[in-house]
Image: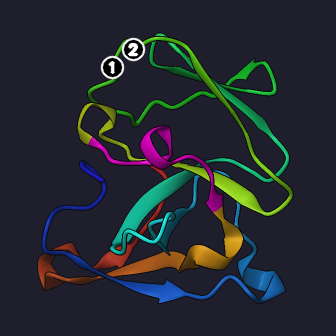
């Protein structure tokens, strides 16, 4: 999740089951990788339930509209691919697109696999603060 989060940093996570913590586009979430392969990942929500996600030339389109992302690094210019999020699925992408194992590789993520939203960077103390969209 460079540049927002670095290797070795710790975050405080709030579960999304409460209405005050509803998951929104741009939120950074912690989740279990789908497919039973194990592992805990941290990525940003790009696509919400019920949306059509298309990536063309490194640009993300949601239901045909370009998603403005000024924080993304290393955008690959790969072929066009398309996914449809089910009623409780999210499309999750890393900020460092050139080096990110995300929904482009394993598809949309079921809401039940999302452990929570990253709220606060706790470690290291020199970088303590809220995890916000940059």
Which of these two is toward me, 19 or 101? 101
Is residue 107 highlighted in magenta? yes
Can you give x and y, in whole percent of width and height, for residue 80 in the image? 54, 13
Identify the residue shown where x is 77% and y is 89%.
18
Give percent across and percent down for residue 30.
46, 73
Nearest the eye: 63 or 73: 63
Percent across and percent down for residue 114 are 58, 75
Farthest front residue in view: 36
**Marks 2 and 1: in contact by CB < 8 Å?**
yes
Mark 2 crowd level (few <14, some 14–19, many ≥20, 10 Å Cα): few
Figure quadrant of residue 17: bottom right
Q: Is residue 57 above or below residue 66?
A: above
Query: How many neighbours does mark 1 have within 10 angstroms: few (below 14), some (14-19), or many (20 or more)?
Result: some
Asked which secondary structure carries label 2, the reply is loop
Q: At x 37% / y 67%, what residue is drawn?
A: 41
Residue under numbered circle 1: 76
Q: Name the quadrant containing residue 7.
A: bottom left
Q: Which residue is mark 2?
A: 78
Is 85 one of the magenta-colored residues? no
Disc 1 to disc 2, how far (Cα)?
A: 6 Å
Q: Which residues are magenta?
A: 100-109
Which SS class for mark 1?
Answer: loop
Horizontally, is 40 left or right of 8 in the view?
Answer: right
């Amino acid at each position: 999740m460079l540049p927002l989060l670095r290797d070795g940093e710790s975050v405080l996570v709030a579960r999304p089951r409460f209405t005050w913590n509803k998951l929104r586009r741009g939120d950074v979430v912690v989740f279990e990788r789908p497919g039973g392969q194990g592992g805990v990942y941290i990525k940003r929500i790009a696509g919400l339930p019920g949306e059509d996600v298309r990536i063309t030339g490194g640009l993300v389109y949601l239901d045909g509209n370009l998603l403005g992302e000024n924080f993304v690094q290393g955008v690959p210019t790969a072929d066009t691919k398309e996914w449809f999020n089910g009623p409780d699925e999210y499309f999750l992408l890393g900020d460092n697109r050139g080096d990110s194992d995300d929904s482009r590789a394993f598809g949309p993520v079921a809401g039940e696999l999302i452990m929570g939203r990253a709220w606060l960077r706790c470690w290291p103390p020199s970088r303590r603060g809220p995890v916000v969209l940059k």
